[in-house]
Each structure stands twice: as structure tokens, then as C-alpha cells.
Image (cartoon, rainbow, N blue to C red):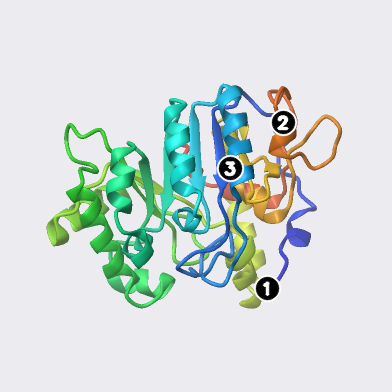
Amino acid sequence: MHATLPLLNDSDFPRLRRGRLETVQVNLGYRCNQACLHCHVGAGPTRREQMDRAIVDQVLGYVGSSGAQNLDITGGAPELNPNFRHLVQAARRLGLRVIDRCNLTVLNEPAQAGLAEFLASEGVEIVASLPCYLERNVDAQRGAGVFQASIDALLRLNAVGYARPGAGLVLNLVYNPGGPQLPPPQAALEADYKRALKRRYGIVFDRLYALANLPIQRFGSTLVSKGEFDAYMALLRSAHCSENLGSVMCRSLISVDWRGHVYDCDFNQMLGLALAAHDRRRPHIRDLKGTVLEGLPIAVADHCYGCTAGQGSSCGGALG
């Protein structure tokens, strides 16, 4: 895999500082039952990195005292970590809003029986990846049979109450472009998704998040291999919108890797760009309690243009 950080480091991206912490995002590991072309994590079935119980409990200890309201759980496929359900239950007991970034097909894994029911019983908000509503496009990006498996999983989530009126169970979907393009306008694309999925499969969901692909890890390496990296970076830079700087996720979020090290965002985690800290060493979640994060500088490089280009892109979808 081509390293992309050396291509991103000489950056003129605007300097940023952290605001009030609202969300702790925790990556439970890079193991996944899929190996998607656009994956910025480089996750897949052969990855073995996973957060152990001790670090999970350190995360819970920090988030419980941090003032953050949201615990955002990601991976890989975070549900494959044996500590996933413990983390969810403990976080809900702390009164946190819990978000599970789910690839949908994990719900069909033999070892994940009852997962949909568990998520519903804990009131977990699901952010589910479905890069298109057309079968051929999804299977081209994620592998043969992934689209139908995703549809089956969405039907299962609807059956246990997700996105149903009055149930209070939130189901959002995520769109990623199939290649080095910016996503189309989020509102119009959401309407297309809702119309197509309802008419063809009877599926309902709440919101669609349209995210740009970041030029790092597997996607960035593919761009380098195809000679498309520079052109994609030029596209992102030309579409930079300074109005999005106030809403980028790194201003209100920290990202914790499977070892417990802390970063400004999930993308910086994948590049090894650590959270800025008072003593300049790479901070660990066990040492972060009592640290004042607000006002600290944010580590930036050219990949950050992916979050400010056009309508903007964050864990919560478009910014503008």
C-alpha cells in the first residue's frame, strides 16, 4: 500500500483550534467482514488489531468525566470486537447518546445473532454505510452480494423498529462516491435514496449522510496507483469552502484508536497525526483526564480539504 502522508504534509490548509468537546469517537479495531475499495481505514477480514477490555474501560472512564454527550463507535466493523456490547451497555448507563457505525452486512454474520435486537433494546443510533441504492454500484465498490446482504440487514432493522414512527430508533445511511469525485448535493440524493429504497424494498430510514472519500489508506493508495492522486487533491483544493471551517468535526470530537491513543479525528488516526497535547508527546486516553482540550491547535494536512470541499463532509454528513 502506498503511504500518502508524505504527499499531504506540505500543506497550506488553514490553522484550526479545538472548541468544546461533544463527541468521543472510539475505533474498536480494524477487523471487518468486508474490504471496501473506498475504505480510509484499510480494514478487512485479515486485520487483527482490536481494543481490549482494559482500554475500553479507560475510554468509559474518560468519557464519563469529560462532559461529552456522544460516544461514536467505529472500526472496521466495531461489532466484531468482543467488548462491543459491554461498551454500548456501559455508555448507555452513563446517559450517553451511542452511535454505531455499521456496515450492515455484519448483521448477517453467524456470530452476530440478535445484534439488531440488542441495538434496538439499547436505543443505539445506527449510521449504516450504503454507498448507492443500485445493486451494481454497491457490489462493484464493496464486493459481490454485498448489496443484497445490506438490503436484508436494513429490512431486519426496520422490523425491530428502526426509522419507524414513534419508536425513537434512528437509522441514518451513508453515501460515498464510487471514485475520485465529490458527492452530489445531500438533500437531493437523500430524496432519491428514500424514493428508491421505499418503492423497491419497502425500506425506510431517517437521514442520508453524503461523505467525500479522503485520499488516505486504501482509497489514497488506489489513487496513487492509478496516477489520479494529484488530480483528486486539485479537485478538493479548488472546491474548498472556508465557511465549512467552523463546523468541521475535529473542532468538537476526539478519536481514540484501538490502543487508546488519541487524535483530532479518525482520518488523522489513520495517518498517525496525534492530538496536540501540552507536553507534545502522543497522548493516551488514560492520561487525558483533566486535560483542557478547548483552544488546543488541531493537526492538519492536505487531506483536510476533503472535509471542507463543496458542501463539506463530516461524520454527520454535509456541513453546508
> Are the two marked residues, 3 and 2, in contact with CB atoms closer than 8 angstroms?
no
Q: Nearer the viewer, mark 1 or mark 3?
A: 3
Three-letter residue code for mark 3: Val
Residue bearing the label numbered 2: 288
Q: Quadrant of residue 233?
A: bottom right
**246 above or below 180?**
above
Residue bearing the label numbered 3: 56
Q: Residue 154 location in percent, x, y? A: 26, 55
**CA distance separating discs 2 and 1:** 32 Å
Q: Residue 216 location in percent, x, y? A: 64, 60
Q: Which mark is residue 1?
A: 1
Q: Nearer the viewer, mark 3 or mark 2?
A: 3
Residue shown at 60%/72% (left/top)?
222
Residue shown at 49%/26% (left/top)?
69
Please indicate whether residue 121 sits to the left or right of residue 317 in the image. left
Three-letter residue code for mark 2: Leu
Q: Residue 109 location in percent, x, y? A: 36, 66
Please indicate whether residue 164 sits to the left or right of residue 29 in the image. left
Q: Residue 182 location in percent, x, y? A: 48, 56
Say which of 13 and 16 sits in front: 16
Q: Nearer the viewer, mark 2 or mark 1?
A: 2
Tell me which label, 3 or 2, sits earlier in the chain.
3
